[in-house]
Image (cartoon, rainbow, N blue to C red):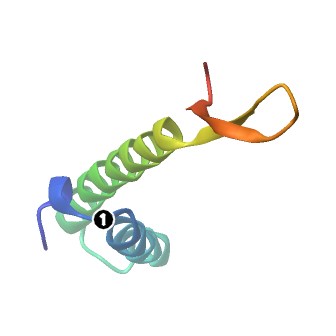
Amino acid sequence: MSDVDQMSFEDAIKELETVVGQLERGDVALDESIALYERGAALKARCEAKLKEAEEKVAKITLGEGGEPKGTAPLDG
C-alpha cells in the first residue's frame, strides 16, 4: 500500500472503493477489518483534501463593461 499523503485523487478514490468493498463483504478477520477501516478513513480524508484544493482553484470569469471577458477572480471573491 502506498503512502496516502502522496496519492492522487483518482488513486485514493479507487483504493477507497476497494476497501469499502472488502468491508461490505465482511470476509476479513476483525484485526484486518480494523486496519482496513483506518486505511479507508485516511483515504477519505485524502480525497476530501484533494477536492478542497480543486475547489480553491476554481475561478469565475469576470466581464468588462462591454460584456467581454477580462480575466478571472476567485470563486468566493
Q: As drawn, which residue projects farthest toward the right? A: 66
Q: What kind of element bears circle 1? A: loop
Mark 1 Cα shell of 10 Å, populated few (<14), some (14-19), many (≥20) = few
Relative to 4, is 21 on the left or the right? Answer: right
Relative to 48, is 43 on the left or the right? Answer: left
Residue found 36% across the figure and 81% down from its top: 27
Q: Residue 61: x, y in percent?
A: 69, 39
Q: Mark 1 = which residue? A: 8
Between residue 72 and residue 12, name the one nearer to us.
Answer: 72
Q: Residue 15: x, y in percent?
A: 34, 73
- Placement of the N terminus among the 4 image quadrants: bottom left
Q: Residue 38: x, y in percent?
A: 25, 51
Q: Residue 25: x, y in percent?
A: 47, 78
Q: As drawn, which residue projects farthest toward the top? A: 77
Q: Is residue 41 above or below residue 30?
A: above
The image quadrant that residue 73 belongs to is top right
Q: Is residue 77 above or below residue 34?
A: above
The image quadrant that residue 29 belongs to is bottom left
